[in-house]
Amino acid sequence: MVDFVGWAMPINYGSQIDEHQYVRNSAGMFDVSHMTVVDIRGADARSFLSRLLANDVARLKVRGKALYSCMLNEAGGVIDDLIAYFMDEDWFRMVVNAVTRDKGLAWLERRAAEFSIAVTEHHELAIIAVQGPEARGAVHSLLPADALDELLESKPFTAVKHGSLFIARTGYTGEDGYEVLLPDGEAEPFWNALLDAGVKPCGLGARDTLRLEAGMNLYGQDMDEDVTPLESGLAWSVAMKDDRQFIGRSALERQQAAGLRNKLVGLVLDGRGMLRPQQPVLTAAGPGLTTSGSFSPTLQRAIAFARVPVGAQDSCSVDVRGKALPARIVQPPFVRNGKACEGILQSSLLAGPGLVSL
């Protein structure tokens, strides 16, 4: 167990590799009750989030539909990344990161004073994420028939509210499944029922390798308040086609006009070696730094995210304990549906002007 922002969290329950493979091949579950659930209620709920989020909640028109977004400061830096669910015109639910809880809530409450809304944190809710090809079936087996009709028709990135359960078809692994929000007192029986249904418990270690393979950023490593989403591989989550004035937009427009200096890319190490965060990277366009890195159980090699100059292409070298190891620059994700994405695996390194030594 390790301390994670005041929560005692398991790195693993047994073999981290096995836990990773459970999720890729069958079903695994994670206790992610450290995440923060926040409801935004009131007549101005939509306009409030339209101002606060870089992505556009105008896209949320169907009850239960979810949206991934960053919440930015005035300089365009990322205060937090989150998922917002549309439940009604006067009710949006958000799930935000534990590590950003205090500053995120303070930011929301400070901005709420300008709108007719209430910000409510739900301490009483636990979250169990059930992920993998067999995850949905396992959850379905525990639910009453009247809850299944709507859930069976649910699409990815939607949520269903049934009684005390809030069941979202979202996750942080690249696999299908659910994130189930439920009262604290119901969490342990639900967890034990999933165990009886054959779902395996998984810890933080597998959660990290799964999200990295899936090309999903981790707040505090791959982006933070000093880096914009445009330099964090998250431009797709920023809606700037209309004139909506969300917080941080002016800074992003200035950055675009001046030209981006850096970008977030994927790295693959085809030879021996381990990639970790904060390792120096050298490309033909200049130096960079890894932000996340680990061994990929699916690919059987080391992979990483790295922030590098925008001109970096094809190949680079990474300083691993004083050795310059050649790596390929790729576009995440690395893995989808349990298999390597196109262009991720190659038997030999690409030769070219981008391959340099440290």
Image (tube, rainbow, N blue to C red):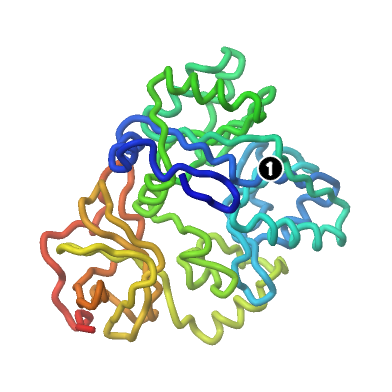
Question: Which image quarter holds the C terminus?
Answer: bottom left
Q: Residue at x 54, y 23 (%)?
A: 190
Indicate whether 173 appears above or below 108.
above
Q: Which residue is mark 1?
A: 86
Q: Residue at x 30, y 39 (%)?
A: 15
Name the side, left or right, on which 52 lies relative to 114.
left
Find the residue positioned furthest to the left: 347
* Neighbour tally class for label 1: few under 14, some 14-19, many 20 plus, Cα within 10 Å: many
Considering every residue shown, the one lying at the far top of the view is: 145
* The image quarter in which residue 48 lies: bottom right
Front-most of 272 and 94?
A: 272
In the visual, does 154 lie left or right of 268? right
Q: Position of residue 298 (x, y in %)?
A: 25, 46
* 60 over 325 or under it: above or below: above
Q: Residue 283: x and y, percent?
A: 28, 81
The location of residue 304, given as percent across then percent down, is 33, 63
Judged from the image, the secondary structure of the residue bearing numbered disc 1 is strand
Quarter of the figure with residue 244:
bottom right
The residue at the point 66 percent across, 24 percent down is 162
Where is residue 315 drawn, in percent x and y? 23, 74
| Residue at the spot 20% in from the left edge and 51% down from the top edge | 300
Residue sitting nearer the eye, 250 or 93: 93
| Drawn side of residue 82 relative to residue 312, left or right | right
* Count of marks, rendered view: 1
Q: Quadrant of residue 66?
A: top right
Residue type for callout 1: Phe
In this rendering, is residue 152 above or below 260? Answer: above
